[in-house]
Image (spheres, coloured by chain):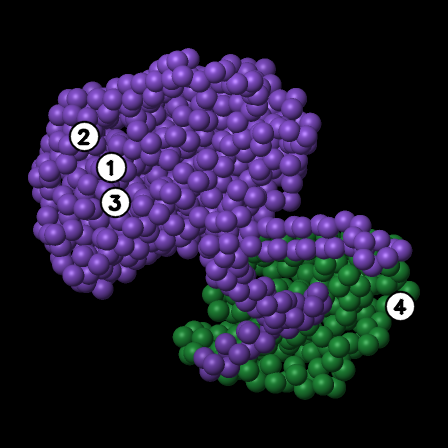
Chain colours: A purple, B green
């Protein structure tokens, strides 16, 4: 019966894409959005039913894809990702209604956006290799088109799209190899058949398939060192698309790793998962560091996506390591933690990207050093960004806190149960988590302090005003979710527990129990988010009340001078003398000089009359991606060099080309004679 | 037609085809080359005709007539017009000079005989023995495309390749179906028409018919 929801998801999504591509400009966006909502709601129904009952939905059709047919299986693990995608998609498309007038209402966009959403909804439902690969490729292509939407405006966009295209296709190729390898050995291409056969595969095949899958899915999830496309594409894509990519698409990279590692191969040796954890740790640190030193608002958010996906990978890796050493309960807790982080990340990063888009629409820039004072001019967007930022910095009572708490719990409690390698890896992971948390907080203090507080640093920022209602609603919806999930994570934890149980074989169903307070199965930890929030509110209220009392009672009222926070006291100062994003990040840059490698350029020009008087000093600093510089650039240079060599063969002469053909023919004939 | 007469006429006609191919490499005058091509077309038609009469195959005789008409008359006429419309109707400086080309043609003929041994062994009929001639014609056609500069020489090379293939097809299979033969002939006819238009364009644009001028289009 609920198979119908899968059909409706696909049908409404296709209808939305067709409507977006075919209808006239006035109705196009509305029709596409409403139909996309239909698709999302149908998917939500199906996924929630699966999560509620724990029963998978199955749909087979031999008519749609020739040769292989389509197999859709929606299990609890996939359902979590479907729900996340659907919610982010509903919010982003709502936002798109208001954003569309900024060059996002073309036929191409209106067709590609629903296609992108629908393919993301369907990817976790795929039940066979062919279905999965087709949907995966559809998702990659649709998102590539959307990244390119602004290609006329800047060279950067074209370059970002090129990076994205190459990385996503190399990733797709490795995924193809991995899945085809598995299905070839299983003799059947449905996931169910592969799962049955995977147990008896030789170790080499299993290892090869897993490593290839990690490379492909890791690049989609933005794991360092495969992340290079992410800061470029997420920053250059239009904001609703950035929110979708960051809130929904990168998650599917995580889904893929869990799918291949846990579901298809049924878990593996410890070194697999150590590798995943290591990637997670590096991604988390690298992403957080770059987020903290970035001055471009969307680039900051993009790097922070790499950071958060790193945290999720740490959770997934820890879960795998615990499962490999036989501790299935803790493994399930770690998996729940990873899934919760994914859900949270979708909520806060979605709202952050959408509100960053609002800032861009209102001011025309993403450069933090050109912004400032937006909290007063765009109070609602500012509040939404604030909620997202507090949440991503993992402060209670918002949802980010619960997720990180769970990860720490699983890592710390898993420590005594594990082997030597794991016992070394886990404390390192915990340390990385802690450092990452600090860097993330710094990054978002910077974003809020410099971007939203203080005084405007440019005319555009001073003239900013609030964006249309639908954009506020879209971003606000996700920010609201951050609060709800922070106060009452129990509404989703049982579902996540069920999903984790379907991912980790042999894990208990009820991993996290409790209504107001959370108890973890097999662990000592306990948390009551709502009580914690109430306590915090009481404490903060108490401090404020005490201060008021003290001020009234004891001190004579001095002459108060009120200025904006982060406005540097505003005495005889211009807005340019405020603290900037660059100066805020400078100490961090100094400390992590070896990793960040900023490009500094100091240019002093003297007056013509005397060399002792300086006319002006120009100081430029830019931060490149060290991994891009040191790994990818040499590869690109090598490819280009090789291309030039090959070009030497083609000098444009028809005769030479014909001669190649004749020589080849003669050689072959001579060889067979 | 009795056995020895059949075999010797077939051999003669196949030989004429190869000789015509060599002649196109030998002569620099484009009009002479086109004439050699016309003779080759007739010889190819004759091969089909002989086979048709021998096998009492009416369809093959029809095909033979069509081949003679298109390859012996229509295509050479079209090419002849291109040649006469340009005053410098000579292959002035081929990439490989004439003596070397002829040596190359001899080498390619040897190669053709060597390479087709297995094919000849497979075909039991008398006609099968002449398959290497068709192969040699094909290779010489390809070779002439590589070493000649004029656009007309290129299309002549292509036609040699096509005639070589057609000869092999006639000899090896005792005639391809009418439909296939028609299709192939139409293709070649079309190529010649395209070339005629292209050559006229080149002539009005550059004033020469050398393919080297097209090098400019590379970047």
Task: Measure the C-alpha gap from mark 1 to mark 3.
Answer: 12 Å
Identify the secondary structure beneath mark 3: helix
| Figure quadrant of residue A645 | bottom right
Q: Nearer the viewer, residue A272 or A386?
A: A386
The chain carrying label 1 is: A
Q: Report if residue A394 is visible in the image.
A: yes
Do tags 4 and 1 sit on the same chain?
no
Label 1, on which residue?
A405
Q: Report if residue A39 is visible in the image.
A: no
Identify the secondary structure beneath mark 4: loop
Identify the secondary structure beneath mark 1: helix
The chain carrying label 2 is: A
Mark closer to the observer (3, 4): 3
Contact (Cβ within 8 Å) of mark 3 with mark 4? no
Label 3, on which residue?
A315
The chain carrying label 3 is: A
Contact (Cβ within 8 Å) of mark 2 with mark 1? yes
Label 2, on which residue?
A527
Q: Residue at x 74, y 72 (%)?
A: B148
Q: Nearer the viewer, residue A507 or A428?
A: A428
Residue A230's x, y, as percent? Answer: 47, 45
**Image vertical order of residue A436 relative to residue B188, above or below:** above
Contact (Cβ within 8 Å) of mark 4 with mark 1? no
Label 4, on which residue?
B88
Q: Residue at x 57, y 44 (%)?
A: A582
Q: Residue at x 30, y 29 (%)?
A: A396
Residue A616's x, y, as percent? Answer: 77, 49
**Image vertical order of residue A407 relative to residue A602, above or below:** above
Task: Measure the C-alpha gap from mark 2 to mark 1.
Answer: 9 Å
The chain carrying label 4 is: B
């Amino acid at each position: 019966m609920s198979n119908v929801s899968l059909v409706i998801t696909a049908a409404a999504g296709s209808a939305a894409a067709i409507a977006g591509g075919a209808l006239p400009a006035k109705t196009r966006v509305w029709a596409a959005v409403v139909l996309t909502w239909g698709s999302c709601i149908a998917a939500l129904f199906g996924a929630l039913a699966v999560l509620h009952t724990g029963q998978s939905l199955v749909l087979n059709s031999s008519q749609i894809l020739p040769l292989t047919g389509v197999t859709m299986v929606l299990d609890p693990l996939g359902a979590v990702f479907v729900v996340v995608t659907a919610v982010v998609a509903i919010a982003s498309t709502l936002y798109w209604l208001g954003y569309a007038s900024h060059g996002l209402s073309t036929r191409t966009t209106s067709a590609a956006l629903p296609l992108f959403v629908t393919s993301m909804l369907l990817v976790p439902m795929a039940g066979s290799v062919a279905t999965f690969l087709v949907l995966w490729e559809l998702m990659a292509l649709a998102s590539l088109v959307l990244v390119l939407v602004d290609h006329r405006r800047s060279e950067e966009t074209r370059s970002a799209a090129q990076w994205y295209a190459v990385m996503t296709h190399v990733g797709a190729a490795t995924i193809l190899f991995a899945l085809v390898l598995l299905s070839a050995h299983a003799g059947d291409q449905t996931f169910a058949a592969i799962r049955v056969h995977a147990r008896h595969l030789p170790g080499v095949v299993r290892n090869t398939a897993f490593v290839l899958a990690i490379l492909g899915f890791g690049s989609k999830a933005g794991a360092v060192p495969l992340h290079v496309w992410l800061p470029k594409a997420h920053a250059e894509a239009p904001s609703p698309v950035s929110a979708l990519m960051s809130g929904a698409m990168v998650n599917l990279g995580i889904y893929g790793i869990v799918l291949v590692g846990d579901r298809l191969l049924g878990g593996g040796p410890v070194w697999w998962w150590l590798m995943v954890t290591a990637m997670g740790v590096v991604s988390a640190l690298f992403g957080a560091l770059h987020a903290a030193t970035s001055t471009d608002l969307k680039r900051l958010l993009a790097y922070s996506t790499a950071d958060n996906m790193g945290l999720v990978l740490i959770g997934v890796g820890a879960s795998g390591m615990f499962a490999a050493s036989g501790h299935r309960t803790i493994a399930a807790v770690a998996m729940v933690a990873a899934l919760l982080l994914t859900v949270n990340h979708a909520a806060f990063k979605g709202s952050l990207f959408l509100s960053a888009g609002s800032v861009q629409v209102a001011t025309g820039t993403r450069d933090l050093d050109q912004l400032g004072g937006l909290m007063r001019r765009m109070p609602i967007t500012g509040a939404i960004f604030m909620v997202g930022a507090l949440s991503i910095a993992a402060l209670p009572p918002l949802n980010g806190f619960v997720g990180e708490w769970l990860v720490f719990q699983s890592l710390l409690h898993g420590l005594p149960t594990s082997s030597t390698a794991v016992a070394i890896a886990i404390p390192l992971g915990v340390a990385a988590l802690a450092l990452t948390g600090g860097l993330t907080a710094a990054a978002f203090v910077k974003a809020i302090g410099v971007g939203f507080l203080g005084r405007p640093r440019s005319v555009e920022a001073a003239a900013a005003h609030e964006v249309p209602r639908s954009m506020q609603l879209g971003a606000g919806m996700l920010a609201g979710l951050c609060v709800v999930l922070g106060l009452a994570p129990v509404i989703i934890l049982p579902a996540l527990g069920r999903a984790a149980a379907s991912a980790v074989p042999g894990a208990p169903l009820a991993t996290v129990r409790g209504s107001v307070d959370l108890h973890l199965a097999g662990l000592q930890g306990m948390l009551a988010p709502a009580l914690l929030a109430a306590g915090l509110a009481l404490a903060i209220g108490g401090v404020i009340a005490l201060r008021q009392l003290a001020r009234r009672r004891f001190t004579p009222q001095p002459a108060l001078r009120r200025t904006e926070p982060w406005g540097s006291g505003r005495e005889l100062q211009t807005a340019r003398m405020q603290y900037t994003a660059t100066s805020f990040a400078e100490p961090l840059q100094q400390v992590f000089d070896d990793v960040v490698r900023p490009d500094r350029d100091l240019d002093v020009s003297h007056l013509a009359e005397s060399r002792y008087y300086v006319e002006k000093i120009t100081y430029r600093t830019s931060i490149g991606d060290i991994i891009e510089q040191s790994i990818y650039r040499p590869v690109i240079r090598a490819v280009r060099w090789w291309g030039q060599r090959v070009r030497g063969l083609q000098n444009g002469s028809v005769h030479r080309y014909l001669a190649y053909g004749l020589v080849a023919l003669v050689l072959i004939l001579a060889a067979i004679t | 037609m009795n056995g020895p007469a059949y075999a010797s006429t077939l051999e003669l006609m196949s030989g004429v085809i190869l000789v015509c191919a060599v002649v196109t490499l030998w002569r620099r005058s484009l009009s002479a080359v086109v004439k050699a091509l016309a003779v080759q077309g007739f010889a190819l038609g004759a091969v089909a005709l002989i086979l048709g009469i021998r096998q009492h195959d009416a369809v093959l005789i029809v095909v033979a007539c069509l081949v003679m008409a298109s390859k012996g008359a229509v295509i050479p006429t079209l090419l002849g017009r291109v040649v006469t419309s340009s005053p410098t109707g000579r292959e002035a400086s081929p990439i490989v000079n004439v003596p070397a080309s002829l040596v190359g043609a001899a080498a390619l003929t040897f190669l053709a005989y060597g390479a087709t041994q297995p094919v000849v062994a497979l075909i039991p009929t008398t006609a099968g023995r002449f398959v290497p001639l068709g192969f040699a014609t094909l290779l010489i056609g390809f070779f002439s495309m590589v070493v000649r500069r004029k656009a007309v020489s290129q299309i002549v090379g292509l036609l040699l390749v096509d005639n070589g293939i057609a000869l092999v097809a006639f000899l090896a299979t005792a005639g391809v179906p009418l439909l296939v033969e028609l299709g192939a002939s139409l293709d070649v006819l079309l190529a010649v028409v395209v070339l005629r238009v292209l050559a006229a364009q080149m002539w009005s644009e550059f004033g020469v018919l050398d393919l080297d001028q097209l090098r400019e289009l590379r970047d």
